[in-house]
Image: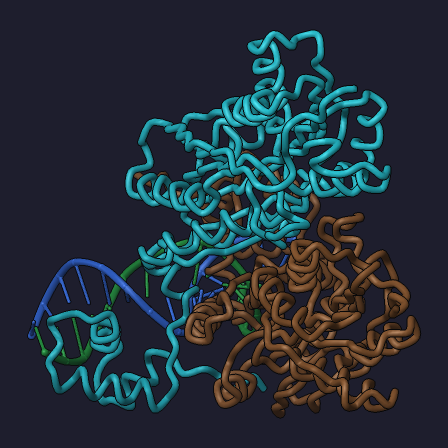
Chain colours: A brown, B cyan, C blue, D green
DNA sequence: GTGAAAGCGCTAACAC
DNA sequence: GTGTTAGCGCTTTCAC
């Protein structure tokens, strides 16, 4: 017996008016007499009336909802970006529908499909693992903006990301400035972001005349993979580690300490992202910080713009990351 | 010019059949001839037909969607619970609509309102900050289950949580077993979960004959508040700290190390939750671990059950937490 | 100002 | 097996 929720019709009969007047009144139309408005509002309140979004969406052919795919809920990076998206989007009267694919392309596609069945007016992908073709075809018929990746471009699709190559350079410049030379990059695995950071690493090393010291150890974007990668890296006797992201950097630091070495006295570690979780000494990580919420806000702005004008040319916005020096990097240990 | 998406009507005319047949065929009804089915499926594929969830929802008066409110996306605890919810819910053909209120009651209420306008069939609250009255009235007309809190009960509402009092006892038993006596509790602020953990702490201390050593320092559930609380706690010269949650424990450890003390050699620290982020040495935290995904799964099961039978009596399920000994607790330092 | 009526895309009787 | 029809709750002309 799901006791039926009151509809606009119930409100109308209670207020002694017509459905249409109720609709007008509730949407704040000026062409409703004060008297009617009051009657209607009262009736609605008494009934506990709540508009049916599905019905409205059907009728106006707009959902006022935008779909958001988050790559991985467990990485706080994405939560912070989402914050930015939400604030911006809400201000403009839109809701969001949130899904995750857990880095699984198939699942991601399925979730996006669901989003689209719900008639979202646009899609913000806070990173993703979709094949190029799939992404292109999605972007071809629904306004799409991708955050943190700019490797795939498509006609109807904007991207908002930080410049990973430049960010990686900042990291290396910082380390070299501290006297480091045997700097190893712990990669984040086989994904575009990690590759870009590798590129920046190599470029910077080369620029500093350290080309022959370039060493890339395969890793991943999680603490566990960072840990293992660091273990492997220690064999190379580095004085500093540049790690693909903050989470993996935590793992790396753990591995270093387990090997009875100290950070930063024996080995410096620098991460990437600038996440805030557990922000103190233990997580007192020197890092390349992205303006996360800002990325989200920008993405939402692009989305909103694109919703009102679907034929906008694709835009690719870069925001810059910045070096945040905290406690895990220090001068290179004098060799003896 | 949002080029109109094909509707069931378009599919029908392309396949040369009626709308209803298309509907039947697409929902896999057996009473559709093989020939028609093929025709229809082909037409749908060619057109790139995608059903309109809003229309279906209106028509069948069911959304097959459940709304999920997450207290705070930045705390990995909730992400892990969500994992459990999602897997379970998906298996039963439901979608989820996810929102956050950022620990802000007003926002939480607004988000739940949105969820309800979208006609979600139930609400899973992965913690919340709602006033009792509001929660009760929500639960009164939509199936609701609350995870991680069992302090508020209401007729139509299930709860799934761990036994925080028992968990806190485990923590204290562990510390006392290691010889600790001056054990300080860093509270998580003024919220039910933190209070329960305080209760367990006091009870256990008393049981061990340490009633007069009970010391509760006010804190919070974030790293920053944990840091500050630990600074204050150090004045009390404790040998061990029981911290309200893992995140705050990270902060506490940071404060201890900044005071040039070592964990666990000088002071032991135990947290609560069992989050996995950054899981290594630095975060090699001894803790009371909740079966997070399990909590989510259970919650979803309750929800599903309650959706099919709205008049089920309220159920309150407890799952038990367990002590996970890692690197931040050790024997009490011999006094000299 | 207000109401009647049509229609959004879909499902579900009900005929045939 | 298949088509016709009504209707889900809402918005939106269009008369009045």
The quadrant of the rendering that contains the C terminus of chain B is: top right
Closest to the observer, B193 or A317? B193
Q: Residue at x 65, y 59 (%)?
A: A255
Closest to the observer, A224 or B103? A224
Whether A251 is drawn above or below B301: the answer is: below
Whether A118 is drawn above or below B211: the answer is: below
Report if residue A99 is visible in the image.
Answer: yes
A179 on left or right of A59: right
Q: Residue at x 54, y 54 (%)?
A: B98
Q: Quadrant of residue A313?
A: bottom right
Closest to the observer, A205 or A93? A205
A228 on left or right of B12: right
Image location of residue C3, percent across then percent down: 50, 55
Q: Residue at x 58, y 13 (%)?
A: B203
The quadrant of the rendering that contains the N terminus of chain B is: bottom right
Image location of residue A155, percent across then percent down: 62, 92
Q: Quadrant of residue B193?
A: top right
Report if residue A79 is visible in the image.
Answer: no
């Amino acid at each position: 017996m799901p006791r039926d929720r009151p509809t606009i019709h119930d409100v109308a009969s209670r207020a002694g008016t017509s459905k249409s007047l109720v609709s007008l009144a509730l949407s704040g139309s000026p062409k409703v007499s004060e008297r009617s408005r009051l009657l209607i509002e009262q009736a609605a309140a008494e009934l506990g009336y709540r508009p049916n979004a599905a019905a409205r969406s059907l009728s106006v052919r707009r959902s006022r909802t935008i779909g958001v795919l988050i790559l991985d809920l467990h990485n706080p990076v994405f939560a912070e970006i989402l914050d930015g998206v939400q604030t911006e989007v809400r201000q403009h009267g839109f809701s969001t529908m949130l899904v995750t694919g857990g880095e699984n392309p198939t699942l991601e596609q399925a979730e996006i499909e669901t989003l689209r069945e719900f008639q979202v007016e646009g899609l913000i992908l806070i990173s993703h693992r979709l094949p190029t073709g799939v992404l292109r075809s999605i972007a071809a018929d629904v306004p799409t903006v991708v955050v943190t990746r700019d490797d795939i471009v498509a006609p109807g699709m904007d991207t908002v990301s930080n410049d990973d190559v430049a960010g990686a350079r900042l990291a290396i410049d910082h380390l070299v400035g501290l006297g480091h030379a045997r700097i190893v990059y712990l990669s984040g695995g086989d994904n575009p972001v990690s590759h870009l950071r590798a590129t920046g690493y190599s470029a910077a090393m080369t620029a500093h005349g350290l080309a022959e010291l370039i060493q890339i150890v395969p890793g991943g974007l999680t603490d566990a993979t960072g840990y293992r990668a660091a273990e492997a890296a220690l064999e190379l006797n580095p004085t500093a580690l540049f790690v693909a992201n903050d989470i993996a950097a935590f793992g790396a630091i753990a591995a270093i300490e387990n090997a009875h070495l100290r950070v930063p006295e024996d080995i410096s570690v620098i991460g990437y992202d600038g996440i805030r979780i557990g922000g103190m000494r233990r997580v007192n990580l020197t890092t390349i910080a992205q303006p996360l919420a800002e990325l989200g806000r920008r993405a939402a702005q692009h989305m909103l713009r694109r919703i009102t004008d679907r034929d906008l040319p694709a835009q690719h916005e870069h925001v810059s990351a910045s070096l945040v020096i905290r406690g895990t990097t220090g001068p290179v240990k004098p060799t003896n």
